[in-house]
Image (cartoon, helix red, strand yellow):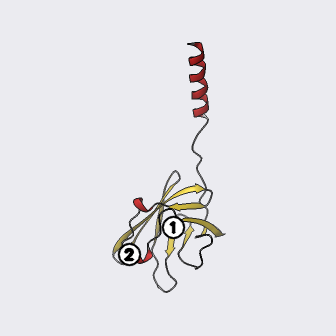
């Protein structure tokens, strides 16, 4: 009985010390590492974003970033359609795309689930 109480107490102490770390999301240009083209990339600046899907298009989706812990949601109205990109911060300035929590009507610009974007260059605040 005494051993069980001690084990429970140790387990509680261990679990209470295991808090979820909140990662940073700095201003900058986020790219897909080792991607052989310049696009897509995401520009983040002071809570705003632009998704640069192709350099051939004049208008690029933009809007405000919503942050819920390490979950990042970017919503935009683009070409009369609502776009939602959802990411998980998996490290400082490292975004992992979550396709089943996203809505991208134009499949031409679809990003594969699990694609990681990392900061390439920072932007001054």
Residue at horizontal 39 percent and vertical 74 percent from the top = 107
Residue 122 at least partly seen: no
Which residue is painted at 55% across and 61% down in the image?
A: 95
Image position of 6 (left or right of 48): right
Q: Which mark is residue 61?
A: none
Measured as percent of width and height from the top left, residue 9 is found at 59, 23
* Residue visible at 60% across and 19% down in the picture: 6
Q: Is residue 22 above or below residue 54?
A: above
In front of the other: 112 or 84? 112
Other residues around mark 2 within 10 Å, as few (<14) / some (14–19) / many (≥20): few
Element carrying mark 1: strand
Q: Foreground: 121 or 114?
A: 114
- Residue 15 in view in this figure: yes
Q: Is residue 90 above or below residue 62?
A: above
The circle on residue 48 is: 1
Mark 1: few/some/many CA within 10 Å (<14, 14-19, 20+): some
* Residue shown at 38% from the left, 75% from the top: 106
Q: Residue 61's spot in the image, x, y percent?
A: 45, 74
Residue 60 percent across, percent down from the top left? 47, 78
The residue under label 2 is 106
**Nearer the camera: disc 2 or disc 1:** 2
């Amino acid at each position: 009985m005494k051993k069980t109480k001690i084990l429970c107490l140790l387990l509680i102490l261990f679990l209470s010390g295991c808090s979820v770390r909140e990662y940073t999301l700095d201003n900058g240009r986020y790219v897909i590492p080792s991607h052989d083209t310049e696009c897509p990339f995401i520009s983040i600046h002071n809570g705003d974003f632009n998704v640069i899907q192709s350099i051939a298009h004049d208008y690029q989706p933009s809007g405000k970033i919503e942050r819920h812990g390490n979950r990042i949601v970017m919503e935009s109205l683009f070409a009369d359609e609502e776009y939602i990109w959802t990411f998980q911060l998996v490290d400082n300035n490292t975004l992992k795309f979550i396709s089943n929590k996203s809505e991208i009507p134009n499949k031409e610009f679809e990003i594969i689930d699990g694609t990681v974007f990392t900061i390439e260059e920072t932007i001054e605040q």
